Image: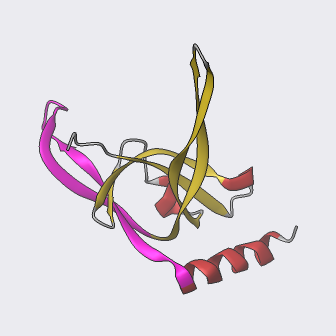
């Protein structure tokens, strides 16, 4: 695979269909404890999408499988993507998400998948 060609394809799609996502992190006081503020870490351009994962539960009558959405953002690899850490926060489409991981797709250095988890505030 020509890496420069692949990077161009991803870049064009993100520019044409992507959005800007702003990631925040909980602020800390001088003792390293959360102080209730949120500071902006980085803003990146990317594509929001959802993969489907399956959860299997064993019961006395058999097994039950159901699908579970796994929200992700596809972005170009770079210095900005390296700033995002597990636990960072994202507000998108009126919902709050927590970053659960950042992975280099196929370890090629072209694109990153930012895995998200919907934040459940109990309401």
Left of 39 or right of it: where is 109? right
| The residue stretch that appears in magenta | 17-44
Quadrant for the N terminus in the image: bottom right
Q: Position of residue 69 (x, y in %)?
A: 51, 50
Left of 40 or right of it: where is 10? right
Q: Could you tell me which residue is drawn at 59 percent across and 30 percent down?
A: 64
Q: Please tell me whether residue 24 belongs to the stretch shown in magenta.
A: yes
Q: Could you tell me which residue is drawn at 43 percent across and 42 percent down?
A: 86
Q: Position of residue 60 (x, y in %)?
A: 58, 13
Q: Is residue 7 above or below residue 72?
A: below
Q: Is residue 60 above or below residue 20?
A: above
Q: Could you tell me which residue is drawn at 14 percent across and 49 percent down?
A: 37
Q: Could you tell me which residue is drawn at 37 percent across and 42 percent down?
A: 87
Q: Position of residue 25 (x, y in %)?
A: 28, 49
* Extreme residue toward the top, this view: 60
* Extreme residue toward the right, this view: 1
Left of 18 or right of it: where is 118? left
Q: Nearer the viewer, residue 107 or 61?
A: 61
Chief secondary structure of the magenta portion: strand
* Extreme residue toward the bottom, this view: 16
Q: Position of residue 10 (x, y in %)?
A: 67, 74
Based on the displayed image, in which of its 4 quarters is residue 75 positioned?
bottom right
Quadrant for the C terminus in the image: top left
Q: Is residue 4 above or below residue 31?
A: below
Q: Nearer the viewer, residue 95 or 75?
A: 95
Q: Please tell me whether residue 45 belongs to the stretch shown in magenta.
A: no
């Amino acid at each position: 695979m020509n890496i420069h060609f692949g990077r161009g394809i991803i870049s064009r799609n993100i520019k044409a269909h992507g959005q800007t996502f702003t990631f925040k992190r909980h602020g800390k006081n001088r003792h390293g404890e959360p102080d209730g503020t949120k500071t902006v870490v980085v803003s990146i351009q990317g594509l929001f999408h959802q993969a489907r994962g399956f959860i299997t539960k064993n019961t006395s009558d058999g097994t039950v499988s159901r699908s579970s959405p796994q929200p992700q953002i596809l972005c170009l690899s770079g210095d900005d993507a390296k700033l995002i850490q597990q636990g960072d926060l994202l507000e998108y489409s009126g919902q709050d998400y927590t970053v659960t991981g950042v992975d280099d797709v196929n370890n090629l250095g072209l694109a990153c998948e930012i895995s998200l988890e919907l934040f459940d505030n109990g309401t």
